[in-house]
Every structure is written in C-alpha cells, then in structure tokens.
Amino acid sequence: MKIWNYIPGINRGSGDDELYRQFCLGRAEAVLIDPGDRPPLPAATAIGSPFDEPALQVYFLAAALPGLDVENPRQVSAWRYPRQYGPRSPLFSRGTIFRLNGFRQFLISGTASVIGHQTHHENQVANQLSESLHNVNSLLEEGHRQMGDSHASLDDEGILKVYIRQAEDLDLVRRTFESTAPAEIPRIYLQGDICRSSLLTEIDGMVHFRPGN
C-alpha cells in the first residue's frame, strides 16, 4: 500500500504542537499499532498544502495481496526515530514492493536529505536533492537485494515526483535533477512544504521491478 497525506500548514505550531507531529500522534492512535521490531507499514508521503485548505486530504493505492516493505540502510527506520521528532514516531516504511497486473512495482515513500535520522545539507536545496536521489538509489538497491531475482532502477518505466518548498528554487532543482538522475526517467515538479521545516525538497515515486539476468 502507498498513502499520500496532504496536510494544511504542515509545519505550523512549535515543538510538539507542530501540525505534522500532531498528525503523527493521531495516525498512531488511529492504527492502534505496537511497532515492535519490524511492523508491516505502508509506504507514505506527507506534504504540506496551504494552511487555508479546508481539510486534510488522504489518498491511497492498495492491492489485494500484501507487499514487501523495504527499509533504507542509510536511514533509521521512521518508526524508530528518537523522541526529538515528536511524541510518536512516523509510522511508514521507506518503500513497498507489490504485484499489480502481473508486474512488480516499487512504491517509494517521501525521501529527503536524511541520513540516519538527521537532516543533512540544511538550507542547501541542490545538495538536499542530490542526497535525496542517493537515498532513492540506496532504497532500490536494498529492494533488489531482498527480491534476489529482480532489478529496479530509475528509467523510463517509472516516475518520480519532486516536491519543492520554495517555488523560486524550481530552476535550480530542475538543473540539479537533470544533471544527477537519468534523462529518461519521467518527473513531475510540485510545490509543497516538507514534513521538517529544515527540508527544502523531497522525492517520491514508482518504478518497475524486472526479472534479473
């Protein structure tokens, strides 16, 4: 499963009153989950919409059979984040592989410039985007390792969405993406706030797994 959460004013409020932290608290109470060692969690994206939007918007893509959750070796699993990020950790997997119409598809969660659990390259949008792409590739490699007989890469059989906090960064983000990612991968650039105020950009998307050689 993949869930997209569009949260009005996602960074409004200070400390534990920040709306994203309150969203994580409500999500944890709603699913009534004991995280345990490796809980089954959907891939997810949380992006801020304008504060005057009338309501939280949630979209999801689901399949009849459960998917395979994948974590990024470069990052602490979100449900293991330390207390400094809020009263309840975000409950999502870094990515999910599932079957649809005979194909294996890799749904990539919102992926930002986070190594371990810490933001890197604060206030440097181009470097944040490059680090985000590094994390996406690391996640794909881990999915390939877990699947064994399949391969996934950024090519024309997938799509990436690039979220940008500040509209004036669009040209720089586009140039950075085009110099770093394969030219054939389709991409969409969207304006939206990221779940941490220190993050200026984030990537999510979908790629296909193909049988390995």
Image: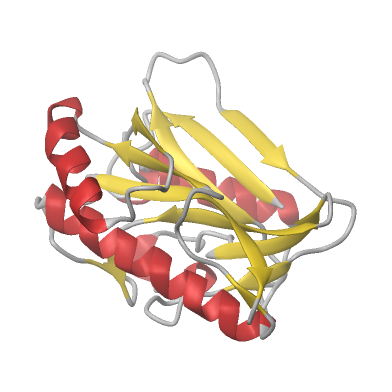
Say if 141 sits above or below 50 in the image.
below
156 and 51: which is toward the camera: 156
Left of 150 or right of it: where is 156?
A: left
Q: Position of residue 131 (x, y in %)?
A: 25, 64
63 and 92: which is toward the camera: 63
> What residue lies at 30% left-to-right and 50% top-to-bottom?
196
Left of 100 or right of it: where is 114?
A: left
Say if 134 sits above or below 30 in the image.
below
Scheme by which the image is coloured: secondary structure
Q: Is residue 113 visible?
A: no
29 and 68: which is toward the camera: 68
> What residue lies at 27% left-to-right and 43% top-to-bottom?
14
209 and 130: which is toward the camera: 209
Q: Residue furthest right?
A: 64
> What residue lies at 34% left-to-right and 33% top-to-bottom?
189
Q: Position of residue 34 (x, y in %)?
A: 71, 71
Q: Position of residue 161 (x, y in %)?
A: 42, 41
Q: Is residue 150 visible?
A: yes
Image quarter hosting the C terminus: bottom right
Q: Residue furthest front?
A: 213
The number of discs equals 0
Q: Quadrant of residue 107?
A: bottom right
> What residue lies at 68% left-to-right and 64% top-to-bottom?
97
Q: Position of residue 54 (x, y in %)?
A: 52, 13
Left of 7 or right of it: where is 143?
A: right
